[in-house]
Image: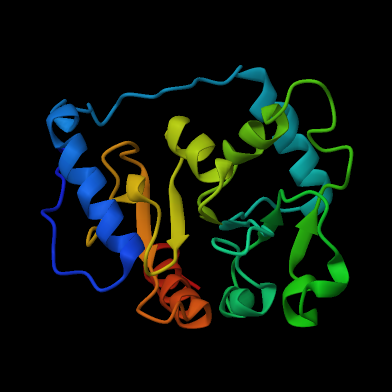
Amino acid sequence: MKPTAETEAPYTDPEALLQARVLKILKPCLSYWLDEQTLYLTLNLSRPAVTRARLETALRELRDKAYVDFRVDPRRSIHPRALLPLAGLASARLISLQKGYDLSDIPAALAERLTDFGEAFDGGPDAFIDTAALMANLDLVVTCDTSIAHLAGALGRPVWVALRHVSEWRWLTDRADSPWYPSMRLFRCREGDDWTALFDEIAQEIRQTFGG
């Protein structure tokens, strides 16, 4: 799929107007073809196997469906309450890779479904190595607009990204795919940034795609 830049529209939001103008400027630079098989990164084949063994020990049965990422950036972060629709996915295993969050902030219905690997996970000098290895064992990564989204996309892992109504310019506008990452789907809030409604939509899509 060739990337396209949307034409400038009569936006009332100054940020949306700025993004439209940036895309218009970048349009000549976005005329390359991205092969669907292209991966930016590859992973040592032994690492996912080691991580899979750790998952099997933790879960007894590896049936991972989603990875939940909590962030504190006020413009892109999602309060854990908005993620409650994911707790209703009966056949899902929810794996958290987020470091440094307070479990007391997580609603009980979600916390009891969540598996966390603790501070030792990705605690060494090789940042994101454990994260990448765990992604290789997951059916789907669900995240907001963070480095996790880019890592999953670069590895070619299935990743769904939750975006606010006016997102960063790199995600373009009015599209559910990304020209940068063929394995990525974009889910956008409607005006008002109702994250709970967006995760209701994401949960329904997971049911249709994976069952449960």
Give the residue at x 30% y 62%. 16
The quadrant in which the N terminus is found is top left
Coordinates of residue 185 in the picture (x, y in percent): 35, 54
Q: Nearer the viewer, residue 71 or 86?
A: 71
Residue 67's place in the image compared with 39, above or below, is: below
Give the residue at x 57% y 79%. 85
Q: Is residue 154 left or right of residue 130?
A: left
Q: Is residue 160 left or right of residue 179?
A: right
In which quadrant of the rendered view does residue 13 lie?
A: bottom left
Coordinates of residue 192 in the picture (x, y in percent): 42, 82
Q: Nearer the viewer, residue 109 or 199?
A: 199
In which quadrant of the rendered view does residue 32 lie?
A: top left
Coordinates of residue 74 in the picture (x, y in percent): 62, 64
Is residue 26 visible to the viewer in this orientation of the structure?
Answer: yes
In which quadrant of the rendered view does residue 193 lie?
A: bottom left
Give the residue at x 43% y 46%. 158
Q: Is residue 155 left or right of residue 146?
A: left
Q: Nearer the viewer, residue 194 or 98?
A: 194
Coordinates of residue 69 in the picture (x, y in percent): 64, 56
Colouring method of the image: rainbow
Please count the marks in the image. Answer: 0
